Amino acid sequence: MQRIHADLSADLFGAAASRRIEQACAAQLPPHTLMRRAGLAVARLAAALAPHARTVWIACGPGNNGGDGFEAAAQLARRGFRPVVSFAGDAARLPPDAQDALARARAAGVPFTADAPAHFDLGVDALLGLGATRAPDGQLAAWLARLYDNARPVIAVDLPSGLDADTGASSFDFGAAPDGMRHCLSLLTLKPGLFTGHGRDAAGDIWFDDLQADAAAQGPDARLGAAPPGRLRPHASHKGSWGDVAVIGGAPGMAGAALLAATAALHQGAGRVFLAPLDPSLPRLVPQRPELMLRDACTLPLDTLTVVCGCGAGTELGPLLAQVLAQAPRAVLDADALNAIAADAALQRQLAERLPRGQATVLTPHPLEAARLLGNDTATVQRDRLAAAQALARRYRAAVVLKGSGSIVAAPEQVPFINFSGNARLATGGTGDVLAGMIGAGLAAGLDALQAAREAAWRHGALADAWPAARPFTAGALAEGGA
């Protein structure tokens, strides 16, 4: 068993793939083996997280997730704990593995109750798991509300009940929780939905036990992004070795967005950074950033640059965006550049033509911008973030970072990545501009579009994760690398 953290690389399998893997593994083992291993894993985690707990309430549902809970109860009883099981279902209709686990729990003397005990020290959510296809209601909803009320720690078995394994969409409002109050033990496979959408809030700390099974033969539906490798700069290098980034944006009243992107590119190691603000009233020097070279956007040699375009651009881009799409060998398109493309079919065609010409492109939409580019709405994007990011990558033939909780990094004909670094500190104005600048620096240094997007997304989140609690968090400080 291992705790999943942002440095880790891992394959992720959705519901259909997880079921195939389960069936293949079960066929090679004696009956009930996988469920007994699963219940034992839950019991071990419960004992480790709450070694002094007197009462452990295990809420069990009508399927195999409930069976895992029955087995966990039997194992805990044998270890001197006092598990109490509440069962929402008909024992006669349980699957065979769950019926076996129920019999083992009863044989171990586990007490059963029709409702939650008046007091418990640890809760276990074994209600719905992977098989959930409907929103919890009635008794199930009441038990979930009790389990996830933040009054005591809870362990979700495989998945928090009501969370979609594939998408991270939730039919139950889990809300937020203090650190250490929520845990999820994902069994046999890690599921994408745990890492994006509502998954992070619902699951809390994520643990994994592969139940001694091998899922390597099954191709993953997604991958968990890992910490990028450290790269040493050779002594025999110079500013030209690390590329030139030009940031085009900053319309009147929004100059800060372009400045943040440029500052981030600078602090991520770009050799030279040109700032081309669209507000003509700005001075020709940024006193606090003398390293930035201010230019008129119309004079930039676009065909030699990595261009970060759109940060705070408003409606001022005009024909510049078409020129960037046509000429820039490497481009990061953010914010108002994306809005302009979403509203212009000719720009959409230009964007899709860049990859066949060997031009690298990264799009960095938030959910509303993604919805505009796809011609749907934010709710549709958020219901299936993986599918939305992959659709954008296919349609526009570009790498995509769909921002949000568990940012999705996708590229045409590639397995998508879910970024596991970052936290709610990033939910503030300007952090997206910082990410765009960081990606630009990676492209300028020679990374391909997918690699530059993945590495920047991870570093962007890791900076927020490492932020001192006593220090105010601002996008400006983030752009400086937390210095």
Image (cartoon, helix red, strand yellow):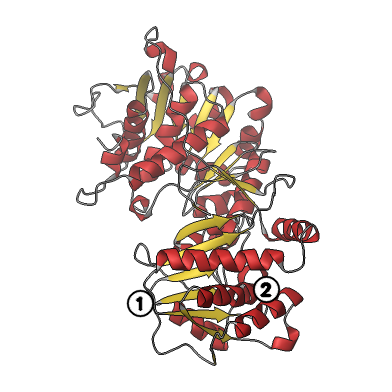
Q: What element does badge 1 sit on?
A: loop
Residue 57 x %, y %: 48, 80
Comes first in the chain, label 1 or label 2 = 2
Q: Quadrant of residue 360?
A: top right
Label 1–label 2 contact, CB within 8 A: no
The answer to whether 134 is drawn above or below residue 332 in the figure is below
How far is disc 1 from disc 2 in space, using C-alphas?
A: 27 Å
Residue at x-position 48% and y-position 73%: 173
Residue 481 x %, y %: 31, 35
List the single residue furthest toward the right.
27
- Tell me the amino acid under the disc marked 2: Asn
Q: Quadrant of residue 450?
A: top right
**2 or 159: nearer the viewer:** 2
Label 1 vs label 2, nearer the camera: 2
Q: Which residue is mark 2?
A: 64
Q: Which residue is mark 1?
A: 151
